[in-house]
Image: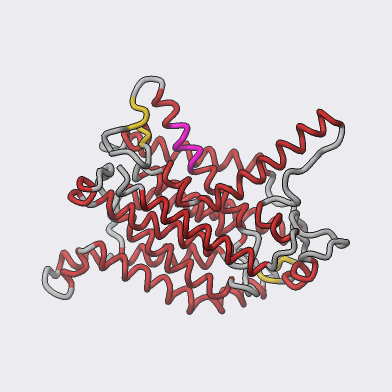
Amino acid sequence: MLYHLSEQFPFAPYSLLRYVTVRSAGALVTSLLLSLWLGPRVIEWLRDLKFRQDYRPKDAQKPGDVTGAADDQAKRGTPTMGGILIVLTLDLSVLLWARWNPLVILALVVLLIFSGLGLYDDWKKVSKQNADGVSSHLKLIVQFVVAIAAVAYLWRLPSGSALVTELHVPFMPAKSALLVGGGATILALAVAVFTIVGFSNAVNLTDGMDGLAIGCSIVCTSVFLLLAYVAGHAEISKYLLVPKVPGAGELTVVCAALIGSSLGFWWYNCHPASVFMGDTGSLAIGGMLGVIAVTIHQPLTLLLAGGVFLAEALSVMLQVGWFKYTRIRFGQGRRIFLMSPLHHHFRKKGWAETKVVTRFYIAAFLCAVLALSTLKIR
């Protein structure tokens, strides 16, 4: 909206709105202030609607466990579905500051659909007051349908087919695509789809402690803010040997808006949390980050930048897989971790929740540094 205003008034200060850096800063500040202002109102609204987590989540400690039992009891009754705050302020900020193009629209459409799926899941949980929301199979079906549609949309763009048919190695120059053409195209398309679905679920699995998922999301999004800016800048992308993606610069505004919304939500979600984001926020954030990674040719870099999310998802898959295998092999299921996802393993070992969260933040920061180092190690 403001970009088009700058076209009508091509003189200072309106001319500054043509710069993506200025609009990104504006998007971040706008979404942050909106989040801080709307936060108490949204939390009170959720409380009035009785959208509270009065049930024990599936991964909660058992009554006989000492570790975490008090924390779990204290969190019961906390409003959930707080992801509404993130999605609302992000959309308003992007509407105000971004120059709309197919890539921006795609990112926001995926955000809204995944948020709607998470909202329905959260609503089923609070309405029944148990952890049985939408079945995992139905969730995956919807996620895969949306991801396939998003990849097909990119494929049909005049200059977008290469975005989903070529895989690029993070530490190699742009010209050194890992796989191009032939049967490799199918593999590249599959990677794009699984990136969107997998990262959405990975962020969802990480959302189990106050401030954990949202803090790590801010760090990961900051990496992709820089990567999107580089991909959208002809000279910088050429210098750093990164694939140039027309229109990707506007995704910088989207990432900035997400950072601002997340910072504002973090204000109310830090320990002890006044609100939980629920699947409404976690599925949406992960899905949109997956789409942005695919759009700028960086799905493999997302594995580095989102290393904490990857570890959380792998811990669940390893735990479930090993338990099923040993139950068939030995007649009794065995565990690799004391509890999964991974953050609960450390909680069971006696770490305080704030210690687990802080150390995961440190790991997320190190993963971000590793991801950004790919810009020079080429």
Residue 167, position as x, y percentages in the image: 37, 34
Seen from the viewer's position, the closer of residues 103 and 46 is 103
Q: Quadrant of residue 130?
A: bottom right
Residue occupying image coordinates x 34% and y 37%: 163
Inspect the magenta stretch and tell me whether residue 268 lies in it: no
Q: Looking at the picture, how far across and down is residue 252, in whole percent?
A: 33, 58
Q: Is residue 195 above or below residue 176?
A: below
Instruction: Give the residue at x 35% y 68%.
Output: 27
Image location (x, y in percent) of residue 128: 77, 58
Q: Is residue 191 magenta?
A: yes
Q: Where, quadrant-wise, is the C terminus in this rendering?
A: top left
Q: Is residue 67 left or right of residue 160?
A: right
Determine the residue located farthest toward the left in the rendered image.
Answer: 11
- Residue range of the region highlighted in magenta in the rendering: 189-195
Residue found at the far top of this picture: 182
**Is residue 249 or residue 364 the one in the foreground?**
364
Residue shown at the point (45%, 47%) measured from the top left = 302
Q: Chief secondary structure of the magenta span? A: helix
Q: Vertical placement of 160 versus 365: above or below?
A: above
Q: How many numbered marks are there?
A: 0
Instruction: Place residue 122 in its image quadrant.
Output: bottom right
Which image quarter holds the N terminus?
Answer: bottom left
**78 with respect to 245 (left or right):** right
Is 10 in front, or is 172?
A: 172
Q: Residue at x 14, y 70 (%)?
A: 9
Above/below status of 376 relative to 276: above
Residue 305 percent location from the top left of the image: 45, 51
* In the image: residue 274, left or right of residue 101: right
Q: Is residue 271 left or right of residue 290?
A: right
Colouring:
secondary structure
